[in-house]
Amino acid sequence: MTGRQYNPHDYPLPYVIEDIHQWPIYKLSEDKEGFVDEVKKRTHNRLKHKFKNDKALRDELAKVLYQERIRLTEKPWKADPPDEKQFWNSVKSKLIKIEQHGEESTIHEEELLDEILDRYTNEIVGQFDVGAFKFAKAILPQFFGRVLAAAPGKWFKTIAGNVKTIHEKIPITGDVDKIRHLATKGTLIVVPTHFSNMDSIMVGWLLNELGLPAFTYGAGLNLFNISILSYFMSRLGAYKLDRRKKNTLYLETLKNYSCVAIQRGAHSIFFPGGTRSRSGTLEKKLKLGLLGTAIEAQKLHYRNFPEETAPKIYIVPCVINYHFVLEAQGLINDYLKEIGKERFFREKDEYSTSFKLVRFMLKFLSASSSLSVSFGEVMDVVGNKVDAEGESHNHLGQKINVKNYFLTNGELKDDNQRDEEYTKILGERIVDNYHRYNVVLTSHLVCFTVFELIKRKLNYVDLFTLLRTPVEDISIPHDEVVTSINNLKERLKVLYDKGEVLMSPELRWNVDKIIDHGMKNINLYHTASPLTILNNGSIGSEDLKLLYYYHNRLDGYELEKFI
């Protein structure tokens, strides 16, 4: 790990831009009307280029209307605007008039397009409120600190007690100084892994602790059902993502929203996995749409600025490491249903509410070393490493000019196929960083080991057959677990030395202490324990699906060969 590693008591670091009114996200919010108009204009132009005549555009509008009416019928959400049905009924009426009257119609395809784009853009757009930011900045550390000072179940008794810094519970690793410096030289795109609904608020808070200006980020519209999240996200730069909407007009609006925000210098958070990891594994394939907007914005910078002053965009991978995940039960159920079809019978999901979210925060913040965050290598938009001054270097360490990636015969030209390939390469480099900067926690190691031993004991039966094994039939001798964890510790040390994974400090402990620490953390929240100690001292499980979910965090390292 390169760069200075800060002491927990050094946080929060001073802001790299002291005046909050000079932050890009503040300027973006102050010019909200101009920003929205720019997004709509850019989206309109790109769609007109895509649908070259009135008939093609009219057909697309009809398709969008059909998809939206299906969404309203089959997948309504509490967070939907109250006038959704009225709006789309109005669109239907206008589209019928266009089709019936043709050129004599009082409304035309482009006008209806603009009406829908206005709807989408104003639905998506976020807001940054200085008052709400200062409130969150003052309240959240106190809340976290009081929780961390308390033993589980005794939080309210210690509300006035001495607090312990949150950074002793949530260690941050990575080249923080480089990230801070580059935030003053260009625009940062932080790309975290995604496991929990907590990720957005947690990553945003941690970036603030690094002294970085506030970031804009996309949050699923469903999260605005949760009162606490909705209050903060709607005021702290979050823009709304509605993953039910997959039509061309909405997706194009979303991409252009992101591109224009980046062009205006707003530091952004993308979750390139697209949604929370259902299986518990680190992301292996990414959704490339928003990543492509970073490449597009960089190309436009080179087009609109002299080469020596063109702002540069930096990609910062970030790995979030939880011992346990609030929504794990529902997520693994979703995953198993998807891959198992008729072989899997889904149980009732856990549902995220404000009460459960607060309870979760109390639980994991009270746990020992319950979360860690690691930042990977900072890259340019085509995946090259950058140095402390933001200069790009190829795999041979040679300094290179990123602008050359966008030139054809010496001229800056658009090439969608080329840019898609660059986006794919960038995605692959991010995934590589996720695996190399993944911090192995005790719970990951113990869950992986026990699940693999169960597979061995049951002779590698089909996954769904294994998951239906009666819990009373699950028993792994303690000494087998100890032996296997010792083997895996040695293998992890080899991988660590090769720069292929990170290890939490607790993995230096003896194996019995590792098992105890891992089990305490993994069992802190769930009603049915993924790991249990049986009367004879062996290790069992009350919920094999959950054990499988947490086991999957170490999938991809070929550790099963060393069990």
Image (cartoon, rainbow, N blue to C red):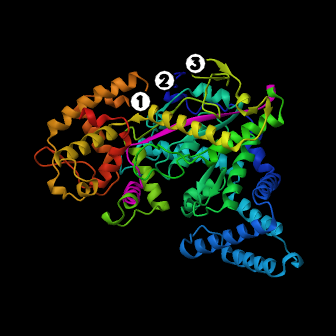
Q: Is residue 250 above or below residue 188?
A: below
Q: Which residue is mark 1?
A: 502
- Give the alpha-carbon distance from disc 1 to disc 3, as whole Å: 24 Å
Q: Is residue 388 above or below residue 449?
A: above
Front residue of 349/154: it is 349
Q: Is residue 175 above or below residue 327?
A: above
Residue 396 spot, x, y in % from top left: 58, 18
Q: Provide the secondary structure element on which disc 3 rests.
A: loop
Front-most of residues 523 and 467: 467
Q: Secondary structure at mark 1?
A: strand
Is residue 313 in the magenta section? yes
Dividing the picture into quadrants, the one containing residue 183 is top right
Q: Which residue corresponds to mark 3?
A: 396
Q: Is residue 267 visible?
A: no
Which quadrant is home to the C terminus?
A: top left
Could one spot residue 162 in this view of the protein? yes
If you read the primary sequence from the N terminus, does the residue marked by circle 1 or circle 2 appear first?
Answer: 2
The residue at which mark 2 appears reads as 1
Q: Is residue 548 left or right of residue 418?
A: left
**Would you say the residues marked 1 and 2 are in contact, meaning their CB atoms lie under 8 Å apart?**
yes
Q: Nearer the viewer, mark 2 or mark 3?
A: 3
The magenta region covers 308-336
Q: Amino acid at mark 2?
A: Met
Residue 152 magenta: no
Rendered residue at 62%/51% (across/down): 218
Of the two numbered discs 1 and 3 in the rendering, the one whose residue sits closer to the viewer = 3
Asked which secondary structure carries label 2, the reply is: loop
Q: In 3D space, how far apart are the residues under numbered discs 2 and 3 (Cα atoms)?
A: 20 Å
| First in sequence: mark 2 vs mark 3 | 2
Sooner in the amino-acid sequence: mark 1 or mark 3: 3
Q: Hey, what amino acid is under mark 1?
A: Leu
Residue 325 percent across, percent down from the top left: 41, 50
